[in-house]
Image (cartoon, rainbow, N blue to C red):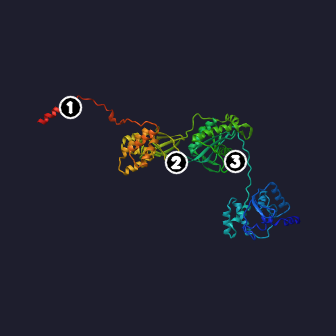
Amino acid sequence: MESNEAAARAAPSDVRAAGACSAGGCDQANGAHPGGAPSARQGSLAIEVTADGGEASLVRRPVTDEEAAKILKLHHAEHWPVGTIGAQLGRHHDTIERVLAQAGLGVNKQSTRARLVDAYVPFIKETLEKYPRLRASRLWSMAKARGYPGSKSGFRAIVSRLRPRRVAEAYLRRVVLPGQEAQVDWAHFGKITIGRATRDLWAFVMVLSYSRVRLLRFSLRAAMPSFLAGHVEAFRFFGAVPRVILYDNLKSAVLEREGDAVRFHPTMLALAGHYRFEPRACAPYRPNEKGRVERAIRDARESFFAARSFTSIADLNAQARAWCLEIAKERRVPDARETTCEAAFLEERSKMIELAGDDFPVEERVEVRVGKTPYVRFDKNDYSVPHTHVQRSLTVLATDARVRVVDPEAPLEVLADHARSFDRDQRVESPGHLQALVEQKRRAHQSRGFDRIFNVVPSSRAMMERLAERGANLGATTSGLLQLLDRVGAETLERAVAEVVAHDQPNLRAIHHVIDRLRHEAGQPPPLSVAVTTDARATAHVRPHALSTYDRLHVEGGRDEDR
């Protein structure tokens, strides 16, 4: 000990100042240093000292294995205090304490001064034994209510040292038979923008536990229809069905759980009965039971989705399917490095359950109510239906591609069939649905014309507002714009309307003039049209009469006047 103390006294004063927070001076609970300001926790920051004794700069120096071994030797073999070790090695005392704590050895501090927290240490230890994950801020409030006068910042450091360390849990490696098991889970891949809508992007992942062959399928919803569609596509991809499928406690699979008692979703059980597999729920908070699918999700994030560009969900799924086939050929099975995933899958497939002859129905079924207008509201958009079914309850059958509307009283008759839109506030229409209504109510023709013009020619709204202020005939203007729209197209008409609105000449004659000029500049001939009426009376057959009839009427009329 004399040689150790002599070495400590021989250290330069400046170096000692760099780590001079000795165990006796820096072990106070509230972080106050005697004779100085409170010190900041520097971690692995150290002060490099120049030859003349001045401080050069603060640099981050990680603790090397050699330094760690030296710290352990000086503290436990030579019995040096923490502050002395820090002064000799140019390290902060917190760094020395952390190295000792990581080695699982107690820190022997030489302190002769009582700390503010000493009286509360038994209470802190007892509380942490009952609640190991209790936050230090809550524990500080409890100690303060019992009279603790120290600060919260210093109290956090004390709790960190007294908190019981979690014992690392060891796991057995799971071994599965070929064709026996698959694992399923959802993964969130952020948000994407479609038109004016912002939607979540989800990925359905199914992994065969033996061969590690996987299917990755993206969708914009994590609801039951997408869940079922993921299973159906995965079974098609594999060409067979695994005997057992492990699920996390998803709402689409597990409705409730009490211990080992699990109540599965009825639709999930119907799917399992159709394909003859056994659904099995993992234990709560046990991610190791489905580690294969968790690793596949991480791999999809890092190796597939990162920096990936796509034009649609269908395009993204096509790329994901090609990626799944590619990695199956290249990658090795972790438990058998000499075998590829594709080769292991060929061995596994013969031991899986044969695929059913028909697919399980995966359509989303929603009951909707039709209002006064012939539209049903579904997934943030409006879809047209025949006007004869207003003020009634109908059923929507939707997939990722199509939206069908049926009458519950006649479910075999499809009232409407539209392409599905994942935008928002869109009006998806079938011309036949509204044509009958327009013919029935001629007054609706003008409003219908407004909707069409405003959607494709945005500048026409400002033009109509100015015409309305001047008392102009909006019906004639709308009819003229619709004719021009059919003749020259939306782009040319929009340019012409925007120009006449800018020059405050909102009339059809000015629009015709601008269109002729634009077509002339583009080298196109002026548009010609022949007006053909759609009135039913135009096709009526008129029988010609002899003109002598009018002569006879003239003669008889003259005789009456003579009388």
Q: Is residue 38 above or below residue 276?
A: below
**Residue tagged 1:** 550
Residue 518 position in % (x across, y down): 45, 41
Point out the tag, 2 or 1, that comes first from the N-terminus.
2
Q: Nearer the viewer, residue 187 or 67?
A: 67
Quarter-of-image position of residue 265? top right
Of the residues shown, which amino acid type is indicated by label 3? Asn
Visible in this render: residue 374? no
Point out the tag, 2 or 3, that comes first from the N-terminus.
2
Badge 2 crowding class, 10 Å Cα cut-off, few under 14, some 14 to 19, many 20 or more, is few
Of the residues shown, which amino acid type is indicated by label 2? Arg
Numbered disc 3: secondary structure: helix
Q: Which mark is residue 288?
A: 3
Instruction: Specify whether 484 is left or right of 327.
Output: left
Which label sits in the foreground, 2 or 3?
A: 2
Q: Nearer the viewer, residue 31 or 468?
A: 468
The quarter in which the C terminus is drawn is top left
Residue 133 position in % (x across, y down): 68, 59
Q: Is residue 90 above or below residue 542?
A: below
Which label sits in the foreground, 1 or 3?
A: 1
